[in-house]
Image (spheres, rainbow, N blue to C red):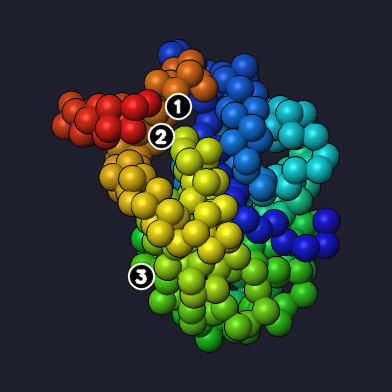
Amino acid sequence: MSNPPIGLIPILATPFAPDGSLDVPSLRSLVEFELSAGADGVAVFGMASEGFALSAAEREVILREVRAVTGPEVPVVAGVNGTGIAPALEQARLAAEGGAVQIMVLPPFLVKPGPGQVVEFFSEIAARADLPVMIQDAPGVTGVSIDPAAVAALAGVEGITSIKVESPPTPVKVAAVRDFGLAVLGGQNAQALIEEYDNGAVGTMPACEFTDVLRVVLDDLAAGRRSDARAGFARLLPLIHLGVRPGQAWAVHKEILVRRGIIASATVRLPARPLDAVTGKALNEILEELAW
């Protein structure tokens, strides 16, 4: 696939059974939901996937099962969060072997790189990986800033084809990097979706529990039904905001998926935490308003 995946590409949650083991039937059910909801592709091993809590063996299983459900035509993006060249390339290799078409790569973050090292890191990954690279610009997670000058330099590197912007305010960063020749996708759970698209984004990579509703918003926006798009998006915003609550985001995503009958359990792995009473009360109210 020569062109980078664009459009609505949800980050799949990773379903676990109550004992914490990987729940493969729920994973397959989740992928089926995303396809029926109108996703243009799916992504695994992102932050919303609890990718930080998965073993290499589990990553292999997840990619194999996801690809088995999607078939060969649907783009699958695999997150890479290694903290150095060697672990990042190992994850990239497993992604290629598992059928991913692109890797979404975080910069190293345990030892914070300088601007020149950021360019060096992504350039080396692009040169040595067997898949095209999406830069994941997520300073809130990594503490690493990737400024527009670095993005401009990386845009000229063979094998780097896109960037996921999660540097707030995301619409401003989208506008700053949109003319560098990379496909620009928004992140941050689609909190600024419409403004990102207004400023040059060609895709979005939110959590996976409201893909069907977000599909309608994007279709309305593309068709010029702006007031309908804004109204549909406004209806989702309380849920979107709850889905980025620190420490609780993963439990929120999974609780919604359970209530919608898509996965069987809302179990999370440390350091994610189960849904607390305060967040649970807010979620109940929001879901009642959405009639979910």
Q: Residue at x 77, y 74 (%)?
A: 158
Q: Earlier in the sequence, mark 3 or mark 2?
A: 3
Q: Amino acid at mark 1?
A: Leu
- In space, the residues marked 3 and 1 are separated at their CA atoms by 28 Å
Q: Residue at x 52, y 46 (%)?
A: 216
Q: Nearer the viewer, residue 94 or 1?
A: 1
Please say whether residue 45 is visible from this viewpoint: no
Q: Which residue is mark 3?
A: 169
Q: Which mark is residue 257?
A: 1
- In space, the residues marked 3 and 2 are separated at their CA atoms by 23 Å
Callout 1: SS:
helix
> Residue 278 vs residue 256: left or right?
left
Q: Which residue is mark 2?
A: 253
Mark 2, Cα crowd under 10 Å, few <14 / some 14-19 / many 20+, is many
Callout 3: SS:
loop
Q: Amino acid at mark 3?
A: Pro
Mark 3, Cα crowd under 10 Å, few <14 / some 14-19 / many 20+, is few
Q: Residue at x 47, y 67 (%)?
A: 196
> Residue 136 vs residue 77: left or right?
left
Callout 2: SS:
helix
Q: Nearer the viewer, residue 189 or 128?
A: 189
Compared to 238, does 167 lie above or below? below
Q: Earlier in the sequence, mark 3 or mark 1?
A: 3
Query: Contact, CB < 8 Å: mark 1 with mark 2?
Result: yes
Residue pushed farthest top? Answer: 19
Please say whether residue 230 is visible from this viewpoint: yes
